[in-house]
Amino acid sequence: MPAALTVDILAPDALDAGLVARWRALLAVNPALTSPYFLPEFTLRGGPAVPGAAVAVLQRGGDVVGIFPHQRRGGAVLPLGAPMNDYHGVIAAPGQAPDLGELARLLRAPRLAVGGWVGPVATGHTRTTVQAALPDGYEVWYAERRAAFGKYFKDKERARRSLETELGPIRTEAGLRDRAQLDHLIGLKREQYRRTGRHDVFACGWTRDLLHALMAPAPAGQDPRFGVSLGVLWAGDRLAAIEASLHGGDEYHFWFPAYDPRWARCSPGILLSMDTMRLASADGWRVFDYGFAGEGYKKYFCNAERSVVEAVVARPGVASAMTAAAAGMLDLTGPGRGARFRDSLRHRWAAIEACETTPAARLRGVALAARAAAARLLPPYVASA
């Protein structure tokens, strides 16, 4: 009978060289853990910026068999950096990680919530992420995609010419680590969140600090290719699109894009992604992750996919009962409204819970989220009552 799992909880800045080496060894034997979010650099460099950050070190018989970076929000345990963390799981050899229920027990977590879980899980909702794999480089990939979707890519070539005609020559830079430009991007994203009614993930402050920490130069002993960098597309003297990406290992993860809406008809964000892939592939990057499937444009670029799980392990409580009651009330106004409300509110709550560090801030966020979700789903006379 194998020895029982035990857990030690460490601060991110308390990880020693031996534990980091063990972390890298576990990654090397588990091909499912390929995203830069799984690298120790994400925790070592970004963890100190995250309130409530910790690392669970799982041991069996004195041997380290798993590592789980996480953060605490009240009674909830979430992946480190959530809601900014698109892939997460226990760093372990295949078949050695505990499932979510066991992990929640080991961490004594009344609630454990994940949105992009890689690893064993007994229940949850499967989601798909999509990637552009370029094993032979950008030119071969582009020729294949253009042959398959000629009309779409011809349209983007026309859009590029139109943007140049209206504003001037296009110039794209990738791999920039410019803090002022990063703050400019964050400002654009905050304006977008206000405009669309989504929760502002940068209002809490620490999320901005996390991006800046990940953009900092690599300390000695860490992978210099890991980190956050910017791609910027200029048309003439105007910044038409900008995007922050996270990269490390073999993967380049597109993360926070923004573009000037005045030139939306010229698709500057799409053009920037294409140029970033072209420039980054020349530096050896071969897998470009577009995140969760859903937006229609991604099918034209992506030729690979992965499955992750969204799940919550929680003790029954008042919060879940209130959500169910609110959903039941909405069901009375029309078939399916409760289910749609639950889905909308669940995703909004995930961002609120992860970002906000005080009960008062979470309460304000929930009130705004519930109002926004109801306004979308109910007839105007109900939503405004």
Image (cartoon, rainbow, N blue to C red):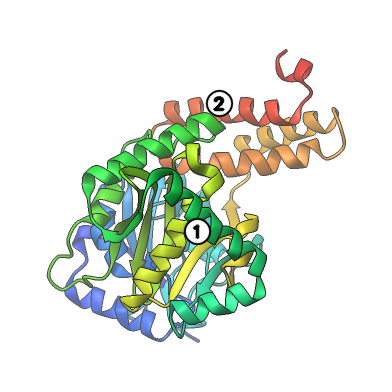
Q: Residue reaching furthest front? A: 165
Mark 1 = which residue?
104
> Which residue appears at 40% of the width and 44% of the height?
167
Q: In x, y percent, where is residue 198? A: 53, 35
Q: Is residue 182 visible?
A: yes
Q: In x, y percent, where is residue 381? A: 78, 15
Q: Is residue 309 above or below residue 363?
A: below
Q: CA distance from mark 1 to mark 2?
A: 29 Å
Q: Quadrant of residue 265?
A: top right
Left or right: 266, with 231 as reference point = right
Q: Quadrant of residue 4?
A: bottom left
Q: Is residue 166 above or below residue 34?
A: above
Left or right: 249, with 322 as reference point = left
Q: Amino acid at mark 2?
A: Leu
Q: Amino acid at mark 1?
A: Ala
Q: Is residue 298 visible?
A: no
> Which residue appears at 67% of the width and 35% of the height?
323
Mark 2 = which residue?
368
Quadrant of the snapshot with the C terminus: top right
Q: Residue reaching furthest top? A: 385
Q: Residue reaching furthest left? A: 220
For this rendering, which residue is in front, 318 or 90?
90
For this rendering, which residue is in front, 234 or 127?
234
**In terms of secondary structure, where does tag 2 sit?**
helix
**How many numbered badges does the structure rendering display?**
2
Q: In x, y percent, where is residue 375? A: 69, 25
The disc, 1 or 2, on the residue closer to the chain's N-terminal end is 1
> Which residue appears at 30% of the width and 43% of the height?
237
- Of circles 1 and 2, the one toward us is 2
Q: Is residue 77 above or below residue 19?
A: above
Q: Residue 245 shows which numbered tag?
A: none
